[in-house]
Amino acid sequence: MKENQTIDELLNEFEKHLRTLQRGRYTLRGYWQIWKPLKRFMAAEGIMDYDKSVGDQFIKSKLGEYDYASLDRMQRHLVNKVDALYVFQSTGQVFFGTAPLRRTPPKLLTGEIGVAMQDFISYKAATFALSKSTQNHHLNALHGFLTFLSSKEVKSIVDINQVYLVSFMKSLDPTTLATNHSKLGVLKSFLTYLYTEKIHNKDYSDVIQRTNYKSQPKLPSFFSAEDIACIIEKIDRGNPSGKRDYALVLLAAKLGLRVSDIARLKFENINWDKGVIEIVQFKTQKEIVLPLLPEVGNAIIDYLKYARPVSNEPYCFVQHIYPFKPITPEDVTGKIGIHIRRSGIVLKNRHKGAHALRHSFATQLLENKTPLPVISEALGHTHTASTMLYLRVDKQQLKQCALEVPMVAPAFYQQKGVFVS
């Protein structure tokens, strides 16, 4: 950590470092929007050297006493840019996005109960080959219960009883039925594990009540062929990011790929000679082979030849800021969502994310009378039951199931007490 460093020296070093990372003028402008008033604040207070306490004073002068989680976007921008100065001063590194000082700490399972929870997750992962995302889901669910027990000063497994379990269930937000259903399912399995492994002498799994939540109660959001065409047409392909995003949207809309598989698409997955894309799906670990449609293939070639930054990454799509790391599923979701909103199509009561494009792909296959097993294979579903969800949006097929409503006998209207206007 550098001591007795003036604000001008620190800002000059920071800006020089940003330029070595190939950050553009808009990024630099975003930092200077905060640095200029910071310099004025220090000059007014007669402060020459910069350290964390100076940054904290400046933030307090702008926001007063604050809770970072409750700040709006511009207020967080201010805090992040000021924190970035101290982080750079201390480590010589720049962390983009939320500054490390403000990031949510990782959820840890600690103490006697936490260790048992971690053992349970490891057991489930080894026995049922749980994916990393499912393991994280278990961790998040059990961490919430562990936090609740800690608030009640329950530190030992043997102290877990029916009273605490019922109290925990009552503490859950009644408006998040799907989340509660999922959390309680994990907790029920954990309690069974404690008993079967003789870690707890009582089986409290029966205390966890089954909720009446029904999965997928709503119709899936989807777009018509005209909507999809509009979304694709409005993407500006005159810049590198537009060329990349155009290919991302086509992979979701024309092939129905999940964002996790789009982000992890490698050069080796594209067989140009055979004209197919061969991948092992991240979610199901099922291998699928999809046709490389000319429209999709041309979009990928256009991006690789004329827009993709020079990078040794084996993945097709990368971020367009140094060090050009592979895009993440969250990146894909965000980019596709932006183009859906920019398209100008009506979005009322419809999801605006990438998964809606996948639903639209399945819906169009249904409209073309594609057999259900073929749709299931194209989507990479392990079971055709998962594909049955899309049948609910096939209006033509549903019309064939409609029953005629029988006429009401005239005597019904002549009953005593029946009023007919």
Image: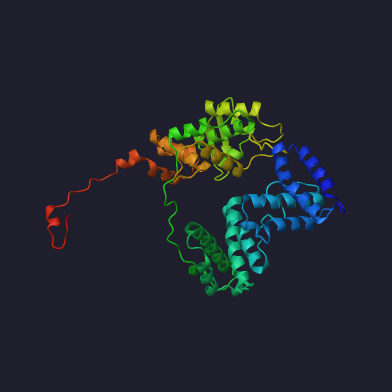
Say which quarter of the image contains residue 104. Answer: bottom right
Quarter of the image where the C terminus is located: bottom left
Residue 170 locus on image (x, y percent): 50, 68
Would you place residue 71 above or below residue 302 in this image? Answer: below
Query: Does residue 164 appear left or right of residue 359 in this picture?
Result: right
Residue sitting at x 57%, y 28%: 299
> Looking at the image, which is closer to me, 4 or 113?
4
Would you place residue 15 above or below residue 122 in this image? Answer: above
Query: Does residue 151 appear left or right of residue 406 in this picture?
Result: right
Say which quarter of the image contains residue 416. Answer: bottom left
Name, please, the residue furthest toward the right: 4
Residue 82 in view in this figure:
yes
Q: How is the image coloured?
A: rainbow
> Looking at the image, which is closer to me, 383 or 145?
145
Residue 404 locus on image (x, y percent): 23, 45
Query: Does residue 89 appear left or right of residue 111 in this picture?
Result: right
Residue 105 in view in this figure:
no
Number of residue marks:
0
Residue sitting at x 50%, y 40%: 380
> Looking at the image, which is closer to me, 288 or 48?
48
Would you place residue 369 above or below residue 128 in this image? Answer: above
Would you place residue 296 above or below residue 148 in this image? Answer: above
Residue 3 locus on image (x, y percent): 87, 54
Query: Does residue 83 appear left or right of residue 327 in this picture?
Result: right
Residue 282 locus on image (x, y percent): 58, 43
Residue sitting at x 52%, y 32%: 232
